[in-house]
Image (tube, rainbow, N blue to C red):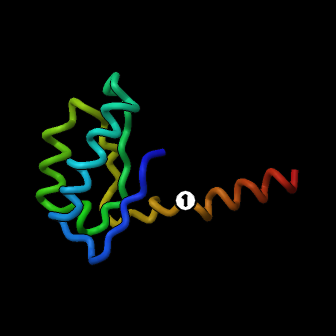
Amino acid sequence: MGALIRLETTLTGDRYLSILSDHLHSFMSIVHSDGLGQFQQDNATPHASRVATKWLQEHSSDFRHFHWSPKSPEMSNIEDIRDALLHAVEN
């Protein structure tokens, strides 16, 4: 859902902030006009920057920000999904 945004350079906190304000906010306003949309990110350094964190806090009434612990091993759940799928196939 939504447009892919191609960056021609390294992502910084300021560039990420422009993506949040220029793209995410309007997308969430259209798709989740009830304010119940949830946004999730992986806590990469630009995602956890002060400017991005502040912007997300300021817009917390527009949509929910699903928080993960920084650098959490739980962010990659591919192994868990694979194990569950293999278990289901074996049964």
Q: Nearer the viewer, residue 18 or 35?
A: 18
Q: What residue is drawn where x is 23% and y is 61%?
A: 16
Residue at 15% across / 64% down in the picture? Answer: 14
Compared with 55, 42 (above or below) is below
Total residue callouts: 1
Q: Quadrant location of residue 70? A: bottom left
Q: Is residue 25 left or right of residue 85?
A: left
| Image x and y of residue 77, in percent | 55, 59
Q: Is 79 on the left-hand or right-hand side of 88?
A: left
Q: As drawn, is 44 to the left or to the right of 87?
A: left
Disc 1 designates what residue?
77
Residue found at the very far right of the displayed protein:
91
Asked whether 83 or 64 is in front, the reply is: 64
Q: Is residue 90 above or below residue 21?
A: below
Specify few, some or many for label 1: CA neighbours under 10 Å numbering under 14, 14-19, or 20 or more. Answer: few
Please report the residue visible at 13 percent of the width from the left and 40 percent of the height from the top: 58
Q: Position of residue 59 (x, y in %)?
A: 18, 38
Q: Quadrant of residue 19?
A: bottom left
Q: Nearer the viewer, residue 74 or 78?
A: 78
| Rendered location of residue 31, percent (x, y) | 40, 32
Q: Secondary structure at mark 1?
A: loop
The residue at the far bottom in this view is: 9
Q: Amino acid at mark 1?
A: Asn
Q: Quadrant of residue 50?
A: bottom left
Question: Could you tell me residue 55's position as x and y percent?
Answer: 15, 47
* Above or below 65: residue 19: below
**Residue 38 higher or lower than 12, as above or below:** above
Residue drawn 38% across and 63% down? 72
